[in-house]
Image (cartoon, rainbow, N blue to C red):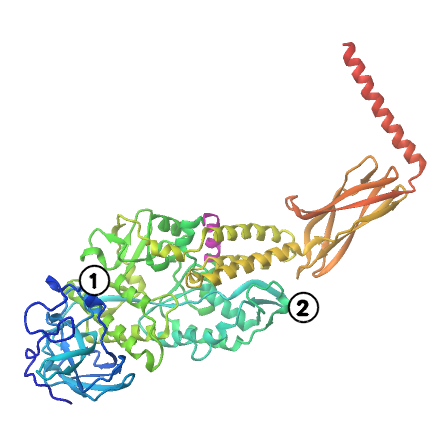
Amino acid sequence: MGVTTAQGRGAHRPASADGREARGGTPQGRGPGGDRTDHARSRRYPVSVELASLTPAVIRQGGELRISGRVTNTSGRRVGVARIGVRIGASGAIDTRGGLATVARRTPLTRADGPEVADRTARLAPLPTGAERGFRLTVPVPDLELEGAGAYALTVHVVRADGAGAGTVLGLTRTHLSAYPDATRLVPLRTTVLWPVLDTPRMEALSLRTQDSVLPVFRDDQLTAAFGPGGRLRRLVEMGRGQPVTWVLDPDLIVQARAMVAGYRVARTPGDTDPQQATEGKGGEAAAGWLAALRAAVRGREVIALPYADPDLASLARGGGAPLAGLLRRASRTGRSVVDRALGVHARAGVGWPAGGELDDGIARYAKGLGLDTVLASGAGVASAGELVSEGATDDGAVSLEGGTTALRYDAAIASQLFSSHPAAGASGAPARLLLRQRLLAETLTAARELPYARRELVMVPPRRMPLAVARVLLTVVAEGRKAGWLEPAGFAAALRKPTAGRLRGFDGYPLARHAAELPPARLAAVVRDRLRMRALAKVLSDARATAASVRAALARSVATAWRADPAGAASYQRGVSRYLTASIASVRLVPKSTVVVTGGSATIPVTVDNGLQQDLTGVELRVLSSRPERLTARDRAMPVQASRAVSRTVRIRVEAYANGPVRLTAQLYTTTDGRPWGAPMMFTADVRSVPSGAVIFVLGGTALIVLAVAFRLRRTRSQ
């Protein structure tokens, strides 16, 4: 350890905005109250400082604070000998959660960072340009002069000693240091932690029928890696097992895993409409292992089954998703039973999760229409009549809204930290993980200190596709807060108990910035059209139930919240469903023909129906209409059509011919259930030849009689 020239915490003067220690007065570049100027905000130091470890995570009683990290010379010139030291914020424990954010935003060294802890520095040898070097600091806890329980601003800086004894700041980093002495007796926050195990939809509407089974087609095989050892979904399950968390599952992910176990195919390209081109999927074993691990992890735990495929409630409420409400309601009913049977649990259903937890009247109404009585909502947008803290950001809990919806508020500040953090795995992500851990510990401890003797709720909600690094930090924070005593794990049901009366705040709680990520109304309209086409397709299938269920599931996936992170994938998936329906409908068609020859008064005309579907064709009939019925007419008004899968069937229509010459005919398929046309009509010419003269005379005589009858009626009318 290097030795500083200062004697005690107050010996070092705070630094000014230009990096030198101030000798008195207001630091340069700062106005009254310590507000930074634009120049100060843009201040760049020549040395970057990153923390790799900070132990212990929570200061309890005595001992030492051990800090390690690395410094890097990011400037274009050599940096001479310097020292590395630490500072504790001058104001002591931070009393408000807004104060935590202020510390994180502060850039240059200021008086607020406090003096350097004396005699607890490390010497830093000269650094060439681009060089980096690790460091370690050990500071006895008493030297930090902490004033009791609370979160403190901790600054680690690099200072170059000048000849006159002043120091030039070369670089710094800040974090938060939480202290909770053993004698502290705060009433712990009852803490509900959600543990989402979700992913982007992978299974298409397309399937490949074989003699023995129906194999679903996946757009890619990425779930194989995610389900396998070390994969994100597998590790989330392993990490969450035995932890005090509430599991949040998408029934569709369970469906996809079970489909992989039973056998599946992978499309050559996403959205492909030819199942014959799909290759065999290799992830059955990985999916089976994941399901077994999940089954063991959720045994005896609270499980939430989200609506099937986790629909984007905000996009649907705003973009005209009312026609899809019935589809989504039906899918969700089956979704919960899938989770219960697959995992051997009794999952809680009826819970909606709008993107970002933002809630307004329209979203609340749409959720209620889907049968979702409980909605997860950011605490920033929902107020309760009896909230204890301004804006209700910490006192979460359940709030009863107008219309019978219960909003379970979760902590907006913690969610923001979890959603915005993307620390990498391994050593490279250690600094980001450390900063996130210390910030969350500070957030929860400061929340507990706001009303130290009140019994309150804290609900922590991570991102849907939670990164493993974020999951690890979240569990660490809960464990440390629980061990210290300011957090007390609680279940989802407990958080919903005894909701207070409340309301949505007096503004649209859905920020404009989020609108860009919503599913476009045009795409929602396309999903609505696809639903109507699915209904039409079901009318002509021998096994309509299975196909309709597959397409309904794909339509639900088309409006999944997961697509917000992948707009290109969302468009591709929806187009794939549309192309599948288009190809399926077009595969039942009349084979074109131009001319047929009819000889004699009675004959049959062959019309070929091509069934390109992978199952038998039923529910359609063929009708042929003549443009000149006095010359040729069809005796069979409608002929039922049945064809085995992937074959063509020739239907023979009986006709009667009365006169020689060409007659234009129109053949059209119709659905038998409602008599609606199917596909495009097919027109061709019947060339009538060798009709007996008697038939011709009969036709002419009949025509003459009609003419005479008309003339007689006209004459009689005039005489009257």
In the displayed structure, would residue 430 be above or below residue 497? below
Asked if one can make out residue 411 in the rendered structure from this viewpoint, the answer is no
Judged left or right of residue 51, residue 712 is right
In the displayed structure, would residue 25 be above or below residue 600? below
* Picture mark count: 2
Secondary structure type for disc 1: loop
Secondary structure type for disc 2: loop
- Check disc 1: other Cα within 10 Å, few if <14, some if 14-19, many if 20+: many
Q: Which residue was labeled with disc 2?
A: 211
Asked if one can make out residue 367 in the rendered structure from this viewpoint, the answer is yes
Judged left or right of residue 14, residue 283 is right
Q: Give x and y (percent) for residue 214.
A: 61, 66
Q: Which residues are magenta?
A: 321-332
Q: Nearer the viewer, residue 516 or 343?
A: 516
Quadrant in the rendering for residue 152: bottom left
In the displayed structure, would residue 112 be above or below residue 615? below
Q: Give x and y (percent) for residue 652.
A: 80, 50
Mark 2 to mark 1 CA distance (whole Å): 60 Å
Quadrant in the rendering for residue 435: bottom left
The mark nearer the N terminus, 2 or 1, is 2
Q: Give x and y (percent) for residue 328.
A: 47, 54
Residue pictured at 12% horizontal, 68% vertical: 28
Question: Dividing the image into 4 quarters, which one contains the N terminus?
Answer: bottom left
Q: Give x and y (percent) for residue 673.
A: 64, 46
Question: Dividing the image into 4 quarters, which one contains the C terminus?
Answer: top right
Checking the image for residue 456, the label placed there is 1
Checking the image for residue 140, the label placed there is none
Quadrant in the rendering for residue 219: bottom right
Helix, strand or loop for the magenta stretch, by majority: helix
Residue pictured at 61% horizontal, 55% vertical: 582
Amino acid type indicated by mark 2? Gln
